[in-house]
Image (cartoon, helix red, strand yellow):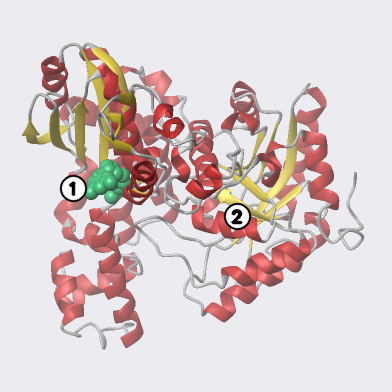
Amino acid sequence: MKNQQIAVVFNEIASLLELKGENPFRIRAYQRAALTIGGLARDAAGMADAELRALPGIGPDLVGKIREFLDTGRVNTLEELLREIPAGLLDILRVPGVGPKTAKMLHEKAGVGSLGELERLTREGKLAGLPGIQKKTEENIRKGIDMLRRGRERHPLGRAMPVAEEIVRALRAKAPMGRIAVAGSIRRWKETVKDIDIVATSVKPEKVMAAFTGLPMVREVLARGTTKSSLLTGDGIQVDLRVVEEESFGAALQYFTGSKEHNIRLREMASRAGLKINEYGVFRESDGKRIGGKQEGEIYKALGLPFIPPELREDGGEIEAAADGSLPRLVTLEEIRGDLHVHTNWSDGGHDLDVLVRAAKRKGYQYIAVTDHSKGLGVAHGLDERRLREQIAQIDEANRSLKGFRVLRGVEVDIRGDGTLDLPDDLLGELDIVVASIHSGFRQSREKITARLLSAMRNPVVSVIAHPSGRLIGERDPYDVDMEAIFREAAVCGVAMEINAYPARLDLSDHHVRMARRYGIPLIVSTDAHITAHFDYMEYGVAIARKGWAVAGDVLNTLPCRSLLKRLRSGKNPGVRSPGRKA
Ligand code: DGT
Ligand code: CA
Ligand code: ZN
């Protein structure tokens, strides 16, 4: 499937246009197209022009470029831009803290054309003094480069997971597979992973290894054997595949799922009980008799423990909890009844309301909240008062004809630099849900950002803080915020914290979820969907909730619609809240 490559091309065109200082709407159009193509479940190559044109944000011009790429492997617009601008500048643009203006200046004034050159200049302290660059900026750029390099060593889960799933699918189709499962940090839903670990059984291991090393995504075969092979994919991700005996599959899956720390603790327990656990099974120490290993659960059973969900296997208290019967019953995807952070084409989303509603119904949801951006976000076509009122009317109209499904009136209101909201309180008070979030001023001081969030939370119209840390995994560090202070206040004023399921965000992180639980704060797992395919990201958000030990009772969007609305209306500052609200 070439979808990802097309998305990369469109993103590169967008970045190069940005470097040239072109119209932001044109840039945004390419970024949106990249999102759409990258999020497609179907192979774009198998779609007719008319089908492509029906996709959100894909006009005839972009269809032409998709065709061009599928036919020739290149897109002329990109080639032309690359003749004007060195490709190395694209890498520089990826450095957090370096925008197009700075990149352009660096190129023109200091002749910087690659990441390596930029790195050398920062190391030598030669950046400060260039137009607009102070010592602090130089420091930020150095940190940004470090982060980029770190990001290359570990891969964001959102990039590795689809590759892992694709490999499992391909192997099942091409080789005589018995059982097969992804193990390692991916199975534990760690937000970044070093590599992909796969465990399998087969009656014909040689055929499996041949199929594995012959996969189309392979860049390099690192090792090839009959029980273990390793390869490097085109995206630079290492994949290890182990084929084991049927009777050892459970033990191998348990062993290679880890974490290492979790496994070490289990083995200590085993040895105290006169047992031995390894990747082949559980054995009695005295006579070597096999006690289990075919099923993963047998490992835990042999130790007198209940099954421990992979998300918890970090030696973070899960073994103690399992031993004393206090493992939480973690929230599940099936318990989620709706998505409360969704964008439509009124702002920067790709679809009309009815398309989103149909997709949400297919997910089995009972509700979604429409939460388009507010006017402060100009490039996202944010809504002003007039357009938000129009949208509310459209939602009310839609609800009149919907049965067993409800569209909540919402907005993702921008928290401005001074902590005030981007739309008037009386209008916000008419909504079912107000999602508030920060989209600018990421470099403000810890005091300022914390105060900004606190003041938004204290506004009684605000229901939830979206992507509370502002990070983009491997691209942008979280802003500097006192999360303890935020959680303390949330516990007082009843504002919920979002677990943004968008794979590049996963924000709150699992660590923050665990912390939030200690404060008893309500959580909401949302996808921030901009196209219907993004609804699938709910699985990531739920996994992060689970990794943070959350149960259904912690997560507001496990509630039926009626209770949810009641909770959103009365949950915070009862009595203070929006007297003007229409029921
Ligand atoms: P990462 O760094 O994202 O790849 O994280 P993991 O947990 O996937 O680590 P990896 O790929 O090095 O190893 C996969 C699993 O194999 C690990 O979670 C537990 C097991 N394992 C690997 N090395 C050791 C070891 O030295 N001792 C023990 N007990 N287990 C190990
Ligand atoms: Ca791994
Ligand atoms: Zn959003």
Q: In this view, does 282 lie above or below 505?
A: above
The quadrant of the image that shows the N terminus is top left
Circle 2 packing at 10 Å, graded few (<14), some (14-19), many (20+), is many
Judged left or right of residue 343, residue 317 is left
- Give whichever of discs 1 and 2 has the lower sequence position: 1
Considering depth in this image, is 89 or 264 the residue closer to the camera? 264
Q: Where is residue 206 in the image (x, y as percent from the top left)?
A: 10, 17
Q: What secondary structure is marked by label 1? A: helix
The quadrant of the image that shows the C terminus is top right
Q: In this view, does 101 lie above or below 354?
A: below
Please give the name of the residue rendered at 60% of the width and 61% of the height, measured from the top-left corner.
376
Give the CA separation, mark 1 to mark 2.
39 Å
The answer to whether one can see residue 200 in this image is: yes
User: Mark 2 = which residue?
Assistant: 466
Residue 414: numbered disc: none
In this rendering, the label closer to the viewer, 1 or 2: 2
State yes or no: Cβ of the residue under disc 1 lies below 8 Å from any atom of ligand 3: no
Residue 80: numbered disc: 1
Q: Which amino acid does label 2 sit on?
A: Ala
State yes or no: Cβ of the residue under disc 2 lies below 8 Å from any atom of ligand 3: yes
Q: Is residue 466 above or below residue 201?
A: below
Instruction: Tell me how many marks there are.
Output: 2
The answer to whether one can see residue 420 in this image is: no
Q: Which amino acid does label 1 sit on?
A: Glu
